[in-house]
Image (cartoon, rainbow, N blue to C red):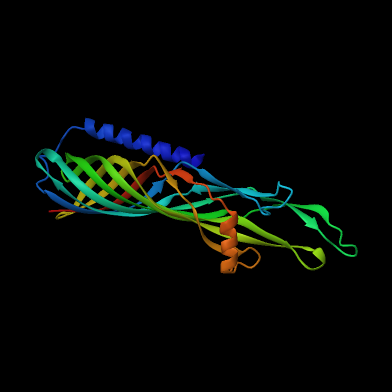
Amino acid sequence: MEEAFTGVTMKNGIWALALLVLALPVFSDGPNSSSWELFFFYGLDFSGKNFAYANSYDPNPGYHIPGSYARQTLNLDPAMGQGIALGAGHYFSGGFGVRLMARRRTIPLGGKNTPYEYFYRYTLITPPYYEPMEATTYRKVDWVPTEGSLSVTSLDLEAAFRLPIAAGVSALLFAGPSLYLAGGRFSPLGFTDEWLGGHGVPMREDYLVHIKLPRRQKIGLEAGLELSVRLSGGFSAVIRAAYSYSGDITFEPTIDEVYYYSYLQPAPEEKINLVKSRFDLQPLTISLSAAFLGAGLKFEF
C-alpha cells in the first residue's frame, strides 16, 4: 500500500511541476543557441502496483479417485528499481526539439507468501496382509519469500519544449511514445513427487521451481519534466522526473530451473520433465507503469 501511494504521489507531482513550469516567466535573454545535446541519467523507479501468481496441479494424475491437489500463491511485489538512460536530442528554433532515449531498468520482486498446500490420495499396501487401503496425505508447508526481478528496456521518442528560466537555468517538458521490452524471473513455486517405497511406505521429495518470464514487448507513453543548471562550457547538471505508462502486459511463464527443496541442488532432467508434465502454468498479466526520478549530465553543442 505504501509503495502504491508513493507511485501515485510521484505521478501527480510530475504533472504539477510541469504545469508550474509552464506558468513561469522567462527571465533569460533568449533560447540557448545549442541545437544538439547528449545526456545520461541514473535514477530510481517507483512501481506502485503489487501482483500475485497462483499455481495449482494434480500430484497424482489418473488416480481412480480424483481430488488430489497442490496449490499456492506467490506474492510478486515490486520494490524500488534502478536504471540508467542514454540519449540524444536536436532542437529547432523556438525551443522545440525531438529526442531519442534508451533506458534500462531492473525492478526487484519480493513478498511474503502463504503456505504451500498439498493433498494426495493414494492406495496404501502394507504388511503383513498387503490389503489395499485408500489413504490420504495432507500438508501445509510454510513457504519462503518470493525472489526475482523484472528487466525492462525502453526506447523513447520524445517531443520536447525547452523553456529558459534564468541565466544558465532551463526547464524541459517532454512527452512521447515508448517501446518496452520486458522479461524476468521469479521463484520458488513448490512441487512434490510422491510414490510408494518398500513395504508400501509413502515416500516424497519436495522441489523448488524457478520460473522464467520470456521477453515481451509493448507500446506505451512517457511524459515528464527536466530541470538543468549549466556547470561549465556545454555541460549541465539535470534532474529528471517522469511517468511511464505501459498498460497491462501479459507474460507466458515457463519453467527455468528446478532444485531439491532439502539441499538446494539442481534436479536431474527427468525431474524437470516431470514438473513440466504436471504444471499447467497460466499467463501472468502485470503493469510496468512507474514513476522515475533521476539525475544526470547533459552536454550541449
Q: Is 141 on the left or on the right of 3, as rendered?
A: right
Q: Nearer the viewer, residue 110 or 126?
A: 126
Q: Position of residue 76 (x, y in %)?
A: 52, 48
- How many numbered marks have been drawn onto this rendered protein structure? 0
Is residue 171 among the parts visible in the rendering? no
Taking the spot 58% from the left edge, 57% from the top edge, the residue there is 277
Taking the spot 27% from the left edge, 35% from the top edge, the residue there is 18
Q: Which of 147 and 235 is in front in this view?
A: 147
Q: Where is residue 97 in the image (x, y as percent from the top left)?
A: 16, 43
Instruction: Judge whether 288 appears above or below 137 on screen.
Output: above
Q: Residue 286 is drawn in which quadrant?
A: top left
Q: Is 293 on the left or on the right of 161, as rendered?
A: right
Q: Going by the picture, which residue comes out furthest to the top?
A: 23
Q: Nearer the viewer, residue 160 or 137?
A: 137
Taking the spot 49% from the left edge, 46% from the top edge, the residue there is 283
Taking the spot 32% from the left edge, 34% from the top edge, the residue there is 15
